[in-house]
Structures are given as C-alpha cells and as structure tokens.
C-alpha cells in the first residue's frame, strides 16, 4: 500500500480510483462497512481503492492545546487499511489554508485535479470546507459537475440496530477500562504501536523486566493492568503473539509523575530495545493503585500475571 502526501505527484495508475473520505480514526466497524462498499465499487470498475484523510486530526488544529486521543495514529491506521485492501492513502495536511478552503475548491484541488477520482464514498455526516459548509448532498452536486459518482453510507449500528459505531464512544469505553466493549465496536482488540525505549530499568531489578513504549500525546486509556497480545511489528502477521501483562499509568508507588505504557512478556526473556511492538488490549485485570512498598507491589504483580495468563489461556479453551 502507498502512503501519499497531498503535494506529491500521483502515480497515473492510481488516478481514477474509488476514494473513501474521512478521518477514519480507529477504522472501526462503521468505517469498515464504508470501506467494504468502496472496495466493491473499485473491484467492479477495475480501479484502485484509496482513502483520503487528514493530518493532523482537525480537532488538533482547532484546539491545539487539547491533544486528541487518537485510536489509530497514522502508522497504525496505514497497517489496518492495508489489511482491508486499501491500495493507497492520500493525506491532506489540515492547516489554516485548508480550514479556509471552500468546499468547491477542496473538491477541485484534491478529488479532481490531484486524484482524478471516478467515485467517492463517504459517510452520511461528512462535512468539509470552510465553516464545514460542504456536505454529502453538495458533494453529489460537485460530482455531477466534474464527472465522478458519489455514494453516501448511512449510519452503521450494532447487531441490534441501536448503538451506532463511533470513535468518540470507543474512546469513552477505553477511558473507563471497557476494552471488550471497545473491541466490539472496533471489530478487533484496540491496539497501540510504538518503539521500545529505555526506561529506568526498575522492573528488571524486581524480577519483571518491561518494554517501555511512549504513546501518542492525548492517549488516555484506563489506568491499570491489562492482559495483552504483543506482536513484533516487523514479524509476519501470521506469527503467534506473545502473551503479556501491560501497565498504563504513572507508577504512584514510585512518585514518578510520568505516564508510561510498560509491557511484561510472560515466558519470554528478549531484548526488545529499538523494536516496534504492537500491543493489543484483551481485557482489564485491575485499576492502578499505590502500594506500601516494593515487596507488596511484587506480590500483587505475581497475582496480576496469574490473572493475565488465565484470561489469555481461556481463549484457547473457549
């Protein structure tokens, strides 16, 4: 899959594609339904399938001092999109110029001149252009003028037809530690990806060496212990995951005042520094808390690892 910036010249083979437009944060089941529609149209027409999205997230532009809890930062979004059959992602920089671009200029510059789209697929609530004045109906009008078709996908809900899938509801679930609820909306276990960096190596001194990963600014899942699956991002996708216990929080026992994601691999002793890991959150074990000392913490960590193993092993026997 190709990742293209809006100022780059587009490969002629990608022009005339079916293009899905949106932020697609999380690539949840609603997004997946939209992309499935776009993929069907692309296959029927024998053209490429693309995504047009925005970086940074528009909310980060309008509220720069309030970091957005990104469910899928760009690198992870690209990996997930590739698995869904997307051929390219066209990234439009969201800045002051774009915020002041009229809906018609946005369409002409990006969809017509840059991509030469044959078909656009978007959600029912997509808005674009200065003042968010562009909407799906206006996009259809522009499509008639410029020679491309437009398909609008209605709201996608759960199997009972009640709760709509949305990035905001998934963020809310993760903040409360409801990772299974989030997984139902996402269609997969929420995953973070990052390079393993050096920490203070305190975990190794107490018998629990951990891989430290810096999350994107704004990431704020529930603070506590999780059962996780861990993949080396460079390994083939068919490679079985390692079982892990992950901690997200600020280590109140040690008064660090810094937020960490620490991952302890069960039954493994590996040098992970410099590797990029994908950590998938399976279930919550407990919330964060302060211990009287290291001995009490170690005793609890042993119990946590037993719970993690039970959670992860139970999927095999289920």
Image (spheres, rainbow, N blue to C red):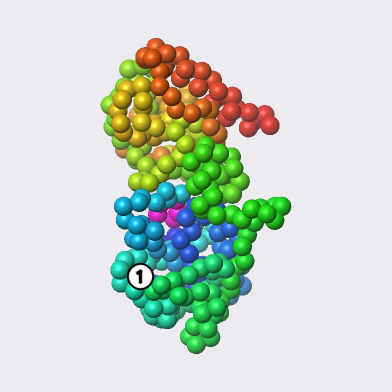
Whether residue 140 is visible? yes
Tell me the residue at 32%/56% (across/down). 64
Tell me the residue at 38%/46% (across/down). 218
Where is residue 246 drawn, in percent x and y?
45, 31
Where is residue 214 drawn, in percent x and y?
34, 39
Where is residue 48 drawn, in percent x and y?
50, 69
| For residue 181, side relative to residue 24 (left or right) | right
Image quadrant in which you'd find residue 60? bottom left
Q: Residue furthest bottom?
A: 145
Given residues 152 and 254, the one toward you in this image is: 254
**Residues in magenta, as a range:** 72-78
Where is residue 195 drawn, in percent x and y?
34, 40
Determine which residue is flagged by label 1: 99
Q: Count residues near mark 1 (Cα–Cα under 10 Å), then give few for <14, some for 14-19, many for 20+.
A: some
**Is residue 167 located in the magenta-colored stretch of the structure?**
no
Whether residue 243 is visible? no
């Amino acid at each position: 899959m190709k990742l293209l910036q809006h100022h780059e010249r587009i490969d002629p083979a990608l022009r005339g594609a079916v293009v899905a437009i949106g932020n697609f944060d999380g690539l949840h089941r609603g997004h997946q339904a939209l992309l499935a529609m776009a993929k069907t149209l692309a296959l029927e027409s024998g053209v490429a399938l693309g995504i047009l999205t925005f970086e940074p997230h528009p909310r980060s532009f309008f509220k720069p001092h309030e970091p957005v809890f990104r469910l899928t930062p760009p690198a992870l979004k690209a990996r997930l999109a590739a698995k869904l059959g997307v051929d390219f992602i066209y990234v439009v920089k969201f800045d002051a110029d774009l915020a002041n671009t009229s809906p018609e200029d946005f369409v002409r510059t990006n969809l017509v001149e840059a991509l030469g789209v044959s078909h656009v697929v978007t959600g029912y609530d997509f808005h674009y252009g200065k003042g968010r004045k562009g909407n799906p109906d206006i996009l259809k009008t522009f499509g008639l003028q410029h020679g491309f078709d437009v398909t609008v996908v209605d709201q996608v809900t759960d199997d009972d037809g009640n709760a709509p899938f949305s990035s905001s509801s998934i963020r809310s679930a993760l903040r409360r530690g409801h990772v299974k609820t989030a997984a139902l909306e996402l269609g997969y276990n929420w995953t973070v990806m990052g390079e393993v960096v050096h920490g203070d190596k305190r975990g190794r001194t107490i018998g629990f060496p951990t891989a430290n990963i810096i999350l994107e600014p704004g990431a704020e899942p529930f603070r506590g212990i999780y059962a996780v699956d861990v993949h080396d991002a460079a390994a083939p996708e068919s490679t079985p995951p390692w079982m892990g216990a992950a901690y997200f929080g600020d280590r109140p026992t040690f008064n660090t005042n810094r937020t960490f994601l620490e991952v302890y691999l069960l039954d493994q002793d590996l040098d992970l520094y410099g590797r990029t890991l994908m950590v998938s959150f399976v279930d919550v074990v407990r919330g964060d808390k302060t211990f009287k000392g290291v001995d009490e913490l170690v005793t609890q960590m042993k119990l946590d690892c037993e719970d993690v193993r039970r959670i992860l092993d139970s999927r095999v026997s289920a």
